[in-house]
Amino acid sequence: MQIPRLIAHRGYSSRYPENTLASLEAALDAGAVYVEFDLQMIADDDFILMHDADLQRSSGVKKSLFSLTSSTVRHFQADYYTVFKNQFSGIKIPLLEHVISLFKQFPKAIAIIEIKEDSLKEFGTEHVMKKLLQRLTDLRDRCYIISFSYDAIAYTKQHSDYKTGFVLHKYNDHYHALADQLAPDLLLCNYRKLPELNSAGELAADALWTGNWQWALYLIDNAELALCYAKNGIDFIETDHIGSLLQHQHLNSQIVKHNAIKN
């Protein structure tokens, strides 16, 4: 049986506010090896963990991220009140440095770091990526830099030896050609964008683009579906429900126990 490797999407985001230290640490404590999170640049060239370009969903505030600095961002919560109500009152938006410190406590963990297109458009791809590559040196050997942006991944490959991942906006000939040009280490896609599985749970023989990359599908929270895609050649499954999937009888073999992974 083919067993996919699991990626914790924005940490343990089904149970904790996404892209927070609580969510990431919960995923690591559950035994996750691969943990994904989103990065946005802010006004003083620092980076925070955030998917959106504003604070409405995370903090209930109609405010752009791009006016924040590392000193002012600490005044805002990331409790995602509409999802969790008062369960995580007081939880803060983490800076990149906080997350790097967390990963230092888990020396076998691998970070999957998505730089968001909003920041690239706001501050310029070259500026953002130059700063990011400088900031990630402590995780150089155990992270992937991923993005929907072709230019961000091209810059990373041209100026560094970091592993990369290209996230597909669409599954069509245009993006196939872009993937061939980039030759990333990971090719990531929403599983719903792929051709549908047939009644036997199989993809068509030519459905997956071939290349030197490994495949990662996201938005999969069902263990049986994860195993089904692994049987079809998918290497990684990204999930909001990392703890639940790691407890599945065929998936829990990849768990790295807390005491073995944490310093």
Image: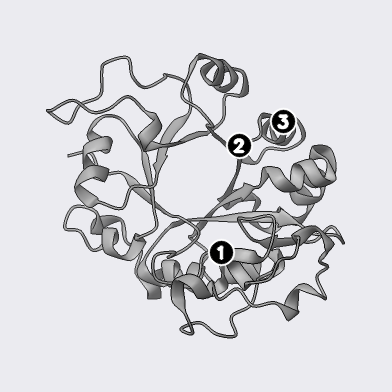
Q: Residue 84 placed where, x, y %? A: 45, 76
Determine the secondary structure under disc 2: loop
Left or right of 126, for residue 221:
left
- Give the residue furthest to the left: 200
Q: Nearer the viewer, residue 88 or 98?
A: 88
Label number found at residue 19: 1
Q: Is there a contact, CB below 8 Å, between mark 1 and mark 3?
A: no
What residue type is disc 2 on?
Answer: Phe
Disc 1: CA contacts within 10 A as few (<14), some (14-19) or many (>=20):
many
Q: CA distance from mark 3 to mark 2?
A: 9 Å
Question: Is 240 placed above or below 84 here?
Answer: above
Instruction: Residue type at mark 1: give it.
Output: Asn
Please name the residue that numbered disc 2 is placed on. Answer: 148
First of labels 1, 3 by sequence position: 1
Dot 3: what SS? helix
Query: For the residue marked with disc 3, what is the amino acid?
Result: Asp
Q: Which residue is mark 3?
A: 151
Q: Position of residue 76 (x, y in %)?
A: 70, 77
* Residue 246 occupies quadrant: bottom left
Horizontally, is 235 left or right of 99 in the view? left
The image quarter containing residue 32 is: bottom left
Q: Would residue 104 be seen by someone viewing this image from the given angle? A: no
139 over 122 or under it: above or below = below
